[in-house]
Image: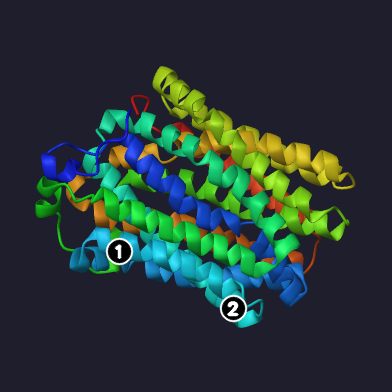
Amino acid sequence: MAIESPSLPLTGHKPGAMVFAILYMLESITRALVLTVMPLQALEIFGSDAKVSALYFGVTIFGLIAGFGVPILIHRYRRRWVYSMGLLVGGLAVVALAFDDPLGQFIGQVLRTLSSTACIIALTLYVLDFIPRNDLVRYEPLKLLLGTLPWGLGPWIGIRLYESYGVWSVAAAGMGTALLAMALFGYLRLTENPAVAAATKPPPNPIQSIGRFVEQPRLRLAWAIAFGRSGWWSLFFVYPALYFDARGVDRDWSGALTGAANILLVLSPLFGWLGRRYGIRLPIMVAFFGAGLTTLAIPFVFHSPLLVAILLLIAAFFVVMLDSLGNIPFLRAVRPLERPQMMSVFRTYIDIGNLLPFAVFTALLLFFDQRAVYIAYGILMLVVGAFAKYLPRRM
């Protein structure tokens, strides 16, 4: 689908899937540049895997709480301003990280989490306004396909800048891309769908939103599926880099591994086709079982960085399948007039996907080495895969 003219909202035409996929791609660049830099920088500052896990645990708590405030901000200021500020805060996050001290690391990670929260919620609401329900299985793979560039090359570029020119070069690149994304978003002049925006309920108390979400079995299952894949990526973006660093592997390889896993996003259209051809239940179950078994195998080859990297890439293949299809159960199940409130609850899978695993990982690392992390999460993936059988066949 071609990119529509920026005057589309004024001429009565709707922005299409490509517009939103491009916005996602640009917003991702700022976050992807520091994806591998952050844990390595945190390790240099704090000195141990356990302390790095504790940092991620604390940062995620802030993001979890802040997520429930986004619908209130959207209701008061409208989503275009919330999305724009989310982009700006993402740029400021990489600047804070550039101070290269404990406070800068903490503030940078908090701002990065807040930026991600605001951008994800606001952009998803735009998508739900303008993308037909039956086209969601096409949009999600398209979004991930365009995300291949930032998530595939960004981590490697970030590490190269960090190692060659210092952390401020990463900050400059990150802020520059954030400003570029803001400029494009302003140029497009996207507006909310008037029919949906006018009828959307004011955001209730967050506790009420949680209660309403939990009452709906399909939303609960959609959250569990999203949580399972999100937590695996949280593990992948932190612990392999620490593993390779401890074994003296060149840091460029950590960035290259992260980039290679994200380049697998080019397979998203294939997974989207599988979802349209066979439904999403079977591919989601296969992906969870494949990722779980492969992750469980990693401790058995822990002596070989090469074999660990190969198994991580195989597991990433299955998790990319989940990325391509894993949000669709929620997008199809959520009721139009409850979208902002239910989205604020659903997106907690991102924060809890960091919070809960890192809490468990921090405890495990007090008594065991990093192999325990892979065993614990491999088992979790198998459990979630078993629950995925309850997805409706027609979904």
Q: Which class describes the residues within 10 Å of circle 1: few (<14), some (14-19), or many (20+)?
A: many
Q: Nearer the viewer, residue 375 or 86?
A: 86
Q: Quadrant of the C terminus?
A: top left
Residue 120 in view: yes
Q: Amino acid at mark 2?
A: Gly
Tell me the SS state at disc 2: helix
User: How many marks are shown on the rendered structure?
Assistant: 2
x, y (%) of residue 333? 29, 40
Residue type, mark 1 in image? Val
Measured as percent of width and height from the top left, residue 3 is found at 31, 35
Measured from the top left, where is residue 118 in percent x and y?
37, 61
- Tell which of 146 and 243 is nearer to you: 146
> Is residue 213 at least partly visible in the picture?
no
Residue visible at 73% across and 42% down in the picture? 296
Q: Is residue 334 left or right of residue 277?
A: left
Q: Quadrant of residue 48?
A: bottom right
**Disc sitting over residue 82 in the figure:** 1
Q: Which residue was labeled with disc 2?
A: 104
Image side of residue 311 versus residue 334, left or right = right
Q: Helix, strand or loop at disc 1?
A: helix
Q: Nearer the viewer, residue 283 or 360?
A: 283
